[in-house]
Amino acid sequence: METRRRCKRLREKDEKKPKAGINIAEMWVIKITVFTFFGAIICSFISQITTSKSDIIISIMLLSFMILISIIFDGIGLSVASCSEDSIKKYARFEKQYKIAQFLIKNAEKVNNICADVIGDMCGILSGACGASIVVQLNLNAQGGHWITILISSVIAAITVGGKASLKKIAVKNSSEFVFMSARIIGIFITKKRKK
């Protein structure tokens, strides 16, 4: 009888407790959505200014750079997602970089989301703007202009997807090397005073 009363009291306490609000996963989705929204606005604004006032050589160079960044970050995102903590233990002697690598692997979902989705999408916006700028600067006539526009867009898409596909194979096979290399680059920008 006493046990039933205790159970009843516990149930009443649970019912009175306020329900938990937004959890960490939901908060991350909100943060990354807002960040991507404003990031895309900034990238679009920069691409409009840069491509409208630049010549065709600068547009091609910027396009190449954006495609390369998109490919590299996609590879980093995949390598972090496919790497395990055991596989980076060989780098434990590099204490600072090892801790960063562990942090990346523990937050693999977020790192992959930032590298593959956020940075990839922003590079895609800039790549599209550069492609459009190249088409405009070629001064194409109305008759065959649309075919050249389609061709340039297709070439940009093919190079981006082909580059990502080729790097993905390497990133999965050498995931620990990719993660440690990323940790070393991040380590350059983190001061010794900061613990995280």
Image (spheres, grey):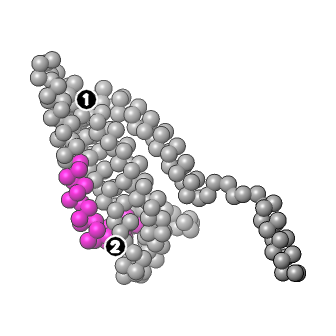
SS for callout 2 = helix
Q: Is residue 20 visible?
A: yes
Name the residue type under label 1: Ser
- Residue visible at 24% across and 34% down? 131
> Magenta region's main secondary structure?
helix
Q: Residue furthest left?
A: 144
Whether residue 26 appears in magenta in the rendering, the answer is: no
Q: Image point 40% across, 37% down: which residue?
A: 43
Image location of residue 38, percent across then percent down: 49, 39
Q: Is residue 168 magenta?
A: yes
Q: Which mark is residue 133?
A: 1
Q: How many marks?
A: 2
Q: Are marks 1 and 2 in contact (CB under 8 Å)?
A: no
Q: Which residues are magenta?
A: 160-184
Which residue is tagged 2? 176
- The quadrant of the image that shows the C terminus is bottom right
Q: CA distance from mark 1 to mark 2?
A: 39 Å
In the displayed structure, 103 sits above or below 34; it is below
In the image, 78 versus 127, the foreground residue is 78
